[in-house]
Image: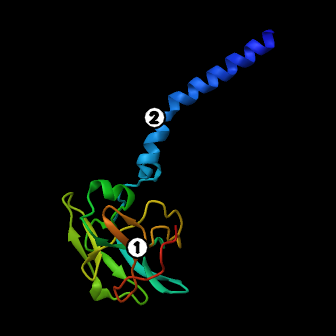
Amino acid sequence: MKRQYLSYLTICASVFLGVLQLPAFADTMTNPEMNMPTSRPSVESSVSISTATLPQGEYLVDQRGMSLYMLDATRQCDAECERVWPPLVAMSDNISAAGRVSASSVGSIPRADGTKQVTYNGMPLYLFAQDRAPGDIMGQGIEDVWGVWNLIRPDGMRLMVGSLR
C-alpha cells in the first residue's frame, strides 16, 4: 500500500512539474526563433573577404572562412534581426579582398556605434548565428520577417542553392 501511495505521489509530482513547464513550451511553439542561437556582431580591426566553393559555385566568406549572406529585404535588418544575422563589422575601412573577390566591390557603410558594416557591391554583408564552423551554410535560402537570405557569388549575385533546412 505504501509503495502504491509513493507511486501515486511521484506521478502527481511529475504531472504538476510538467504543467509548470507548459507556458515555456507553448512560447517556443508560437515563436520558434526563441530557440535560435543569437550572436552579437564581432568587430574586427581588419576584415578580409575571400571565397569558398560548393558544387553550385563559389561564395563569399570572411577571414575565418564563415559564410557571408545578403538580404533580399522586405524590411531593414534591425537590432532584433542582428541577433540572428550579425552584420560583418570592421573598426575601420581596412577591408581586403582575396582570390576572385573584386577589391573594387568591397566597401563599408557607417553604423550608429561608429563601426563600419562591410558591403559587397553596396549590399551589407551578414553572418548567420547558427553557422558554427567554416563551410557551414545553414542560413542559405532562409525566408524570415526581414526577407530572404542568400550566399553571395564573387560577381555580387545570389548563389542559388536552395534552402538547406
Rendered view: 100 above or below 21: below
Scheme of image coloration: rainbow
Residue at position x 51%, y 28% in the image? 20
Numbered badge on residue 84: none
Rendered view: 69 above or below 50: above
| Apparent side of residue 84 relative to residue 108 in the rendered image (left or right) | right
Q: Residues within 10 Å of mark 2 (few under 14, many from 20)?
A: few
Q: Earlier in the sequence, mark 2 or mark 1?
A: 2
Disc 2 residue type (three-letter): Pro
Rendered view: 60 above or below 34: below
**Could you give the CA–CA distance between mark 2 and mark 1, rounded to whole angstroms?**
36 Å
Q: Residue 70 location, x and y as percent?
A: 34, 74
Q: Secondary structure at mark 1?
A: loop
Mark 2 lies on residue: 23
Q: Secondary structure at mark 2?
A: helix
Mark 1 lies on residue: 68
Q: Residue 109 location, x and y as percent?
A: 21, 71
Q: Residue 51 location, x and y as percent?
A: 45, 82
Q: Residue 98 location, x and y as percent?
A: 41, 85
Residue at position x 44%, y 60% in the image? 129
Determine the image quadrant of residue 115: bottom left
| Apparent side of residue 93 relative to residue 30 in the rendered image (left or right) | left
Determine the image quadrant of residue 128: bottom left
